Amino acid sequence: MRSPVMTALAIAAGLIVLLGYLIPPEWTSLAYIQAVRAVFIGWAVVLAGIAAWVGVIHLFLTHLRRMSARREADRYSVLVVLAFLATAVAGMILTPADPGFQQAVLAIQVPVEATLLGLLAVTLVFASMRLFQRRKGVMAIVFVVSVVFFLLLGAGLLMPLQQTPLLGGLIGFFERLPIAGGRGILIGIALGSLMTGLRILLGADRPYSG
């Protein structure tokens, strides 16, 4: 059952936070709204941190149960648990600001991210080939050509062509094109978040009431 009290509290809290951002600092008579907004944001940060810790602990306990399973024990869970304990202990002793700790984490994180990006590139090429086989048309051809071109561009194989007067400017344009696409995606995410927030403020969506 959806309680109207919870809906009213959620809408009131959202409006206070929104007004706190819209009120200019020169309006000292309404400074208390900004103070309340800061308190609400602080509570939200604390709750988000607690939720993250709950998720991490749940993941840790899940892998512990998989390790202790009598049938088909997961060997990769051992690596996850050991890596988690080593990272947690080192982070508590050295603190995350320690340069050696940061370098050790980056030495593991960067190769993993590069591997995932490589797998993503291979998967994208394979998907484009399957698309070209199943749906032959203009859009499929454009998609395949775009994938191959940007893979070559990202790999730096088209760098010698930048020395030519005409192709240099064209390749520079294509290098900036993914940045524009990324900004478009960020704008879409921002608009989606804005619409979700407005729906919650208006009471159309009530994810907090179960």
Image (cartoon, rainbow, N blue to C red):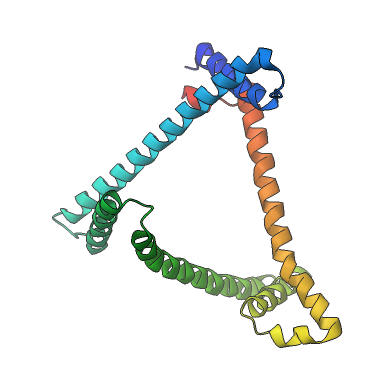
Counting from the top left corner in percent of width and height, residue 72 is at 19, 60
Q: In this view, does 139 lie above or below 180?
A: below
Would you identify the image quadrant in which residue 133 lies?
Answer: bottom right
The residue depicted at 65 percent of the width and 45 percent of the height is 189
In the image: residue 14, left or right of residue 83 = right
Residue 203 visible from this viewpoint: no
In the image: residue 74, left or right of residue 30 = left
Counting from the top left corner in percent of width and height, residue 68 is at 15, 53
Q: In this view, does 194 lie above or below 100?
A: above
Would you identify the image quadrant in which residue 170 lies?
Answer: bottom right
Question: Which residue is most to the right?
Answer: 166
Q: In this view, does 89 lie above or below 50?
A: below
In the image: residue 66, left or right of residue 168 = left
Q: In this view, does 73 lie above or below 51?
A: below
Q: How many labels does the image show?
A: 0
Counting from the top left corner in percent of width and height, residue 88 is at 28, 51
**Looking at this view, is 8 or 154 the one in front?**
154
The residue depicted at 51 percent of the width and 24 percent of the height is 40
The residue depicted at 66 percent of the width and 40 percent of the height is 192
**Looking at this view, is 40 or 58 the one in front?**
40
Would you identify the image quadrant in which residue 109 lies?
Answer: bottom left
**Looking at this view, is 203 or 106 the one in front?**
106
**Looking at this view, is 140 or 83 the one in front?**
83
The residue depicted at 27 percent of the width and 59 percent of the height is 83
Counting from the top left corner in percent of width and height, residue 47 is at 42, 31
Residue 50 visible from this viewpoint: yes
